[in-house]
Image (spheres, rainbow, N blue to C red):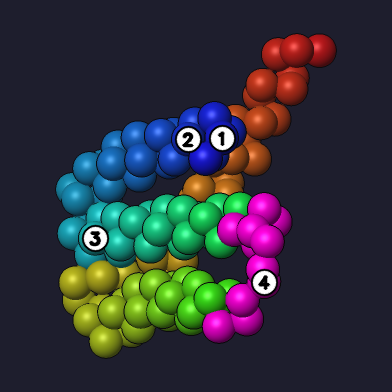
Amino acid sequence: MDAYIKRGIKVTLIISMMLGLILMFIQLSFAFGLWLGSVAGLINMLITSSYYADLLFEEEFSVVKYGLFFLIKLGFISGSLYLGIIFPNYVNIFMVALGLIMLKLCLYVTEFYIRRRKE
């Protein structure tokens, strides 16, 4: 895993923990939803980076392995959203969705600031 993804994971964890602590005082389901979505999004990114590395650098391409990775990723995303639907009093589905895309947002924003600093 390269430094780009590690930095994004670190920033995402810090932001989701701080934002979750603030949201705990507003409504607890917001914080749980954000944390659940962030964890599912981080696991999704780790699985994605793992199977893309295998896909690009492995000698043989295995359709079964690729399909299994895809189903696991889909399971994490749909499972976290499903928990938001089934338990709306404990997990806010909108915060789960925000948590799922938080890693991508953090990567874009940090990359934007890094490039802007270089100019």
The quarter of the picture where the C terminus appears is top right
User: Which residue in the structure is indicated by mark 4?
Assistant: 61
Q: Locate residue 81 relative to residue 30 in the image: left or right.
A: right
- Please tell me which of labels 4 and 2 falls first in the chain: 2
Q: Mark 3 belongs to which amino acid?
A: Phe
Position of residue 72 measured from the top left corner of the image (x, y, whole percent): 43, 75
Q: Label 1 is placed on what type of residue?
A: Asp
Distance of label 3 from label 4 (alpha carbons): 38 Å
The secondary element bearing badge 2 is classed as: helix
| Residue 2 badge | 1
What range of the chain is rendered magenta? 54-64
Whether the residues at callouts 2 and 1 have beta carbons within 8 Å, the answer is: yes
- Eye-nearest disc, 4 or 2: 4
Which is nearer the N-term, disc 4 or disc 1? 1
Q: Counting other residues with Cα less than 10 Å from the Cα at mark 1, is it few (<14), some (14-19), or many (20 or more)? A: few
Q: Pointer 2: what residue?
A: 6
Along the polypeptide, which appears first: circle 2 or circle 3? 2
